[in-house]
Image (tube, grey):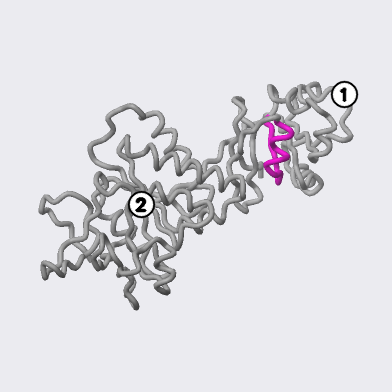
Amino acid sequence: TLERVGDGAPGIAFGLVDLPHEQRQDLARYVPDVDGHLLVLGAPGSGKSTALRAIAAAAQDSEIVPSSVDVAWDLLADLLVEIEHSAGSNGDESSRIILLDDLDSLLARFPDDHRMMFADRLGRCLRDGPGVGVRFVLSAQRMIGDAQSLASLVPSRLMLRHASRHEHVLAGGDATHFVEQLPPGGGVWKGNRVQVALAPAPGQEPRLARVVALTPGRTLAIVSTRADSLGRRLSALPDSVVIDLESAVGDVREIASDGRRLVILGDVDEWQSRWGALAALRPVADILFDGCGVADYRALTRSRELPPPLTTDRTLLWTLNEDGTASRARLPN
């Protein structure tokens, strides 16, 4: 473990570094203002998460991005808005550190459209964040695929153990700095052997994915890929009257305006055949998309807006907001 050291030296102490030319050891320090963003690279079990915990524990202002796809999406979206809103200001004198562990694994778990957007947003944060005092510490096994374009935006490297010299070089390391059989947390920092300190997991309040509340008692217009089973479930609720869009007659706006708590339910094809129905219902109903893909959502809303990713929780769906954006919502129980 590493105690906080009040020696006045700048930066975040995260381990011990060997200085053979001086025949001594010193604290290994990450200085965000000098080193910029930091990328921690290593094989599984090499101590990447340990390194991020050590930096988080020693930093004055830090936040670890959760590993959940939907929560990470929300956090980065909020952070980008914050960075862009603060652009042009002098920023904080002290750095705010955002730590994202296993970036390559996180990106691989996003659906294709969301993965590209998340990588794009992260790139914008990496480019513009330093101007407002925001630095990133990322970890990965190797920066490939969508992560590859981000590597050039991260100037500093902490190279932990790799399976071979070849893997070390492929990850961007100097072949002369490769060390075999490093212990967990062992690596190379600025050309010198380093051992990352152990640190407790930070006491960070857990974040939850953002889910908006549906308007109580308001009509629901639902586009669903499982309309039959969903209809049976919602029909069992005491306050719901489910109407099958295919069998509905008349103007859907009149159906939605008769004072009852209605659920107007149809599949993608049925809503497409009643072109304009969703737009007509927007002033009087919550518009929901259950089990739909991005292409279906965009086709029916005539929007290029990318709705947020959903987890495997089948009670979550998309709702169309008044401003044309999409949010997560939860089906009534």
Q: Residue at x 32, y 60 (%)?
A: 158
* Secondary structure under the numbered disc 1 in the rendered image: loop
At 41% across and 31% down in the image, what residue appears? 84
Q: Amino acid at mark 2?
A: Val
Instruction: Check disc 1 and report the residue beneath it.
Output: 250
Q: Is residue 30 magenta?
A: no
In which quadrant of the rendered view does residue 2 lie? bottom left
Query: Image quadrant for the N terminus?
Result: bottom left
Between 100 and 148, the one nearer to me in the picture: 148
Mark 1 vs mark 2, foreground winner is 2
Q: Residues within 10 Å of mark 1 (few under 14, many from 20)?
A: few
Quadrant including the C terminus: top right
Q: Which residue is mark 2?
A: 137
Q: Is residue 290 magenta?
A: yes
Residue sitting at 15 percent across and 63 percent down?
26
Give the percent coordinates (x, y) of residue 227.
79, 44
Q: Position of residue 179 (x, y in %)?
A: 32, 74
Q: Amino acid at mark 1?
A: Gly
In the rendered view, tell whether residue 264 sits above or below residue 48.
above
Q: Which residues are magenta?
A: 286-301
Q: Are marks 1 and 2 in contact (CB under 8 Å)?
A: no
Left or right, residue 326 beside residue 12: right
* Residue 193 locus on image (x, y percent): 25, 68
Q: Between residues 140 and 296, which one lies in front from this camera angle? A: 140
Tell me what residue is drawn at x 71 percent, y 44 percent: 292
